[in-house]
Amino acid sequence: MKKHDVIVIGGGAAGLMCAIEAGKRGRDVLVVDHAKKPCEKIRISGGGRCNFTNIHTSFKQFLSENPRFAISPLKRYTQHDFIARVKKQNIDFHEKTLGQLFCNESAQQIIDMLLNDMRAAGGRLRMRAEVTHIAKMDNEFHLTVDGDHYSAQSVVIATGGKSIPKMGATGFGYEVAQHFGLEIVETRPALVPLTFDPSMLEPMKELSGISVDDAVVKHQKTKFSEAMLFTHRGLSGPSILQISSFWREGDEVEIGMLPDMDLMVALKEARQANGKQEIQTVLAGFLPKKLVAFVLEQSGVQGRLADLSDKKLKAVSDQINHWRIKPTGSEGYRTAEVTLGGVSTNELDNKTMEAKKVPGLYFVGEVVDMTGWLGGYNFQWAWSSGWVAGQSV
Ligand code: FDA
């Protein structure tokens, strides 16, 4: 039986942060991960540049049954603390938009920083390691990892969510929680492209690859104003990914593709100035031609402006700025960036991330019911929750 003070299951963002902090406190830490390489999600994040935090992070950008649970971890280890860590390593970064910070060069720099810090703190990493058994006896945890027996005073579950199974995502963390009798908030894919039925997809097919720089996408009282992309399966791009975390089956979303424009006024002015112009010519000044053709087909309006009534102009303007559309589903965990739901925050102490019913068992990162908006919030949650657990394990 090999003994460690702490075994962290999952060598991703939250697990490594926890291992670093525990190691700095003199704890003997082993991180086990079943993948070939650690931190694969960091590597592919932010298009390879890792949107590692957001300068505006607060609990308000999180979805959970209890978003306020995040207040204390986010305050104890803030976005500014992580930024200071990145600066200390001389990793250059920039703000892309909306407070989102990205590496100038590569996400690998963040991975190297974490791995170096973990090794410097005495932490060890065992990759391609399958945990087949975990139990608590007296005040100790017993684990079987690839046939080897281990014991530890604390076990940290940092196995992330279910998104992108191809990269090693599993429901392992939820199974462990259930095994120890902890409540799970139902999980679903989030930050994910939305899909449509064939009758809607057919006319949209031509639009695949077209993007709208600033689209306002609404679901009930929630709205996001970011880019949107037409794909061969439906809609994607930041504004759609954001709203997908709020959307539920059977609901509509409303899309505005020229949100800063009073289109009705613009069309009436154009009609007055030059009534001979075709409506598609005017609209092609604002939107890609193929998209204009789609909008006009959907609203059933064609022809010269002079021949179009206010009602017809309104139909076109609504089709562009109040386009109500009912997705049939999402691309699912295959492409989702995160998983909504997870281990209920009711079960955890937010000062330590320890399970209240199972002393010594901790949950950090995405496996917890705490899901950020797109824009660096999910990594900040991984850093903050991992750091908090690292002070206690
Ligand atoms: P994470 O998933 O990072 O790590 C979990 C680890 O556990 C993995 O190494 C896995 O192999 C391991 N594991 C799983 N099951 C196991 C088992 N049974 N046994 C042993 N090990 C196991 N967020 C953000 O803030 N900014 C961004 O730019 C992006 N970009 C982005 C792009 C894409 C394509 C995706 C899919 C996701 C993002 N995200 C993001 C989200 C972000 O990657 C995610 O929220 C964090 O990585 C979560 O960190 P965790 O450490 O909790 O899990």
Image: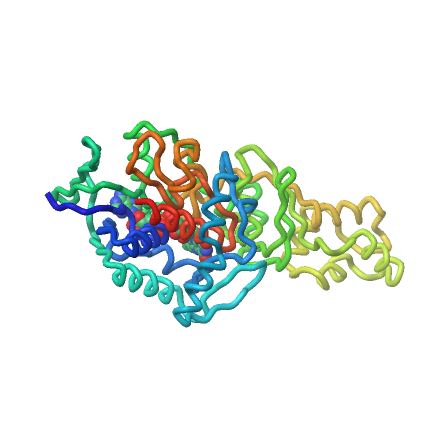
- For the point 44% across and 68% down, the residue is 87
Residue 330 image offset from top left, x and y in percent: 48, 42
Residue 41 locus on image (x, y percent): 37, 55
- Residue furthest out toward the top: 181
Nearer the observer, 195 or 278: 195
Left or right, 302 with respect to 188, comes to: right
Horizontal arrangement in the rendering, residue 98 relative to residue 168 (left or right): right
Q: Residue at x 22, y 51 (%)?
A: 28
Can residue 168 be seen by looking at this rendering? Answer: no
Quadrant assignment for the C terminus: top left
The quadrant where residue 348 appears: top left
Residue 262 visible, this orientation: yes
| Depicted 242 relative to depicted 369: above or below | below
Q: Give left or right: position of 59 versus 165.
A: right
As drawn, the residue found furthest toward the front would be 25
Most foreground residue, 358 or 375: 358
* Residue drawn at the location 62% of the way across and 60% of the way down: 213
Q: Name above or below for residue 278 compared with residue 73.
A: below
- Identify the coloring: rainbow
Using the image, determine if residue 82 lies above or below residue 8: below
**Residue 254 placed where, x, y %?**
65, 43
Q: Where's residue 282, x and y in %?
A: 76, 61
Q: Quadrant of the N terminus?
A: top left
Q: Residue extending furthest right? A: 272
